[in-house]
Image: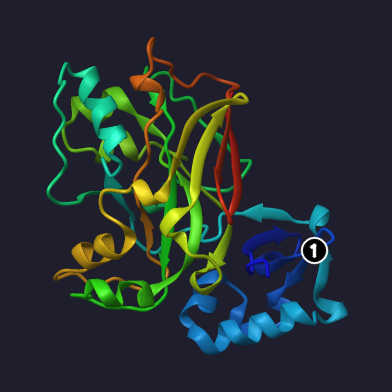
Amino acid sequence: MAGLKLITFADSAGSRAGVLLDGGRVLDLGAAMPPARDMIGLIEGGAAMLAQVRALAANPPAGAVLPLAAVAIQAPIPRPRRNVFCVGRNYMDHVAEGDRTRGITQSEVPKYPQFFTKAGDTVIAPDALVPAHEGVTKWLDYEVELVAVIGKAGSDIPKEKALEHVFGWTIGNDVTGRDLQRRHGQWFKGKSLDRSCPLGPVIVPREDLDAADLAIGCRINGEQRQSSRTSKMIFDVKEIIHQLSAGFTLLPGDVIMTGTPEGVGYAMQPPQTLKPGDLMELEIEGIGVLTNRIAG
């Protein structure tokens, strides 16, 4: 059975949550189930509300079904309430490729997750344009990442309980100005350029997808650049949530990007930077494809 695919979409009536149905249709949850009108409300509604959404998706009321072609898909959470939480250097081959660019030949496994954040208003929709930021960075780069969306609040979360706090999974692109990332030491500046966090296109509920070993990859202009599996993370999602929540309360709707595998542009020989017009296609098994283009 295919997993439920939750979306946020917009049309002339505004933005609201929905479900992708087969046959190029969308279930409008704003019409069918007003308490689930937006994704944060749906998430905060917990298991009971999600069960109601499943029932509606299985037997959608005719008056709440729209053609997909008539709506615009937005990021599943168009504006997170807080910064997007991120993990750096979380695939060993990515650690090694980054080290090689600095002349380091013997890479060490990080002892702890390396956390940083992207500003919440960097989030943009699938198919939205990412600025080239040519006056600010000469090293614009891509990163495909599995994203965990928090469903249940908690702090000091034990590792064995961590997945109970996950609402679902989506795809993120941690677009980065590499020269800014290195220049400023702390990564926030290089990671928080305007419109540098494409997210989507759907959220698949945790119960519908085991994210422990999924194919993950990225194509640039049709060329496969990244190809790995989520099982190659140094710190898995359970460990990330356990460590991040230590003394810090995670809230429903929080977005956690879990790191990128090897194959980023700046580590290629010769290095490849993103340029105006470049097409980025990020794919994770069971979730879908997140597509964006560099403006220009």
**Quick one: quadrant of the N terminus?**
bottom right
Q: Is residue 248 above or below residue 182?
A: below
Decide: few, some or many residues near mark 1? Use Cα within 10 Å; few <14, some 14-19, many ≥20: few
Residue 44 on image: x %, y %: 46, 80
Please name the residue that numbered disc 1 is placed on. 22
Residue at image position (29%, 77%) is 161
**Colouring used for the render:** rainbow
Q: State whether residue 10 is above or below residue 111.
A: below
Residue placed farthest to the right in the image? 62
Q: Residue at x 50, y 51 (%)?
A: 171
Could you tell me which residue is drawn at 49 percent across and 70 percent down? Answer: 206
* Left or right: 59 as drawn, with respect to 142: right
Instruction: Say which residue appears at 58% left-offset and 56% top-offset.
Output: 286
Q: SS for tag 1?
A: loop
In the drawing, does residue 89 fall left or right of residue 105?
right
Can you give x and y, in whole percent of width and height, for residue 129 in the image?
A: 58, 35
In the drawing, does residue 57 fall left or right of residue 204? right
Amino acid carrying label 1: it is Asp
Within the image, what quadrant is residue 102 found in?
Answer: top left
Can the viewer see residue 27? yes
Q: Is residue 166 above or below residue 45?
A: above
